[in-house]
Image: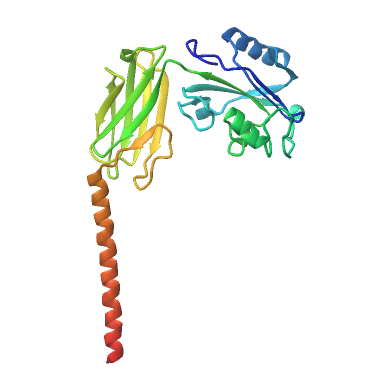
Amino acid sequence: MIHKGTQTIPKRYLDYGSLTIVQASLKVKEATTVLKSLVKQGELIIPELTNIHFEGTFTHFFENDYLHSHNEQYSIEWPTNVFICEADQGFKETMRGGTLVAKSLPLYPDYFHAIKNELGVDLLRYQGWQNTVVFLLPNYMARIVHVKIGKSRLSVNVQTLEANLNDLMGKLYIEYPTESESTEFSFTRNTIEVPLKERPSQVWLYLLDREKGDILDYRRIRLNWGRASLQEGVTLDITWMTCKGSYNKGRMRRWNSNYRQKEKTQAVANSSKL
């Protein structure tokens, strides 16, 4: 489901015989009809595309019910509500292996690669989604676009569509090497900065609706200052002085180690002479 101001996704239908990949945009009313027919009649009916008999049960995945923006599981930029209907045992299928080849369609070595390339979902990492119908309902109120973390400050950049900046509040829990702190802040502009006591080791950041208290977006960041951040939309701001200090400390440790080794070798040599 896309925002009303977003260009619709072109309809795409790839039929390999053993696998059919469908990509299309549905209006809210159409999506509601699809959900109702699945729950009441056990029929997965996507207008003009497919009609599949399907019986299953909606399951609860706790923390996975609401995914933060830029989540690695799906190619969706906004925070998303997740509803999963798992097929009953009699309706589960085992995906066939082998190369997917058709005259007018892209060639793929197997269905894993086809789904990852066409839909952006990596089933090799998330095989629990097989034999399920997954409904993704993005929340277009507001989202965290980028987080930049340095030694003395943290900056947060947000984007709003259905909310105003003064409708938002941020909550932050920071874990340092020897202590922790919890704080909150408001948004007067899209990018704000929060002071830090020192370089943090972990950060929990939540974006809330100020009036209702609803969670709009969040980030849970475990920091590894020796490597680049692997989480999309998170940057570690390591200044030149920090790098230089780390380099000099490493250089001094190596010099001390080499010096001790040299002294040890020389002591052994002297002992041999005696």
Labels in figure, total? 0
Q: Residue furthest top?
A: 29
Taking the spot 67% from the left edge, 36% from the top edge, the residue there is 108
Q: Which image quadrant is residue 85 in?
A: top right
Q: In this picture, is 196 found above or below 248?
A: above
* Nearer to me, 169 or 227: 227
Q: In this picture, is 229 found above or below 155?
A: below
* Nearer to me, 138 or 240: 240
Q: In this picture, is 159 found above or below 114?
A: above
Assign the C terminus to one quadrant of the image.
bottom left
Assign the N terminus to one quadrant of the image.
top right
Image-based side of 173 in relation to 28, left or right: left
Taking the spot 28% from the left edge, 91% from the top edge, the residue there is 273
| Residue 246 in the image, given as x and y percentages of width and height | 27, 51
Taking the spot 54% from the left edge, 29% from the top edge, the residue there is 74
Coloured how? rainbow
| Residue 171 in the image, given as x and y percentages of width and height | 33, 25
| Residue 39 in the image, given as x and y percentages of width and height | 67, 15
Q: Which image quadrant is residue 119 in?
A: top right
Q: Which image quadrant is residue 165 in?
A: top left
Q: Residue furthest bottom?
A: 274
| Residue 29 in the image, given as x and y percentages of width and height | 60, 7
Q: In this picture, is 138 found above or below 116?
A: above
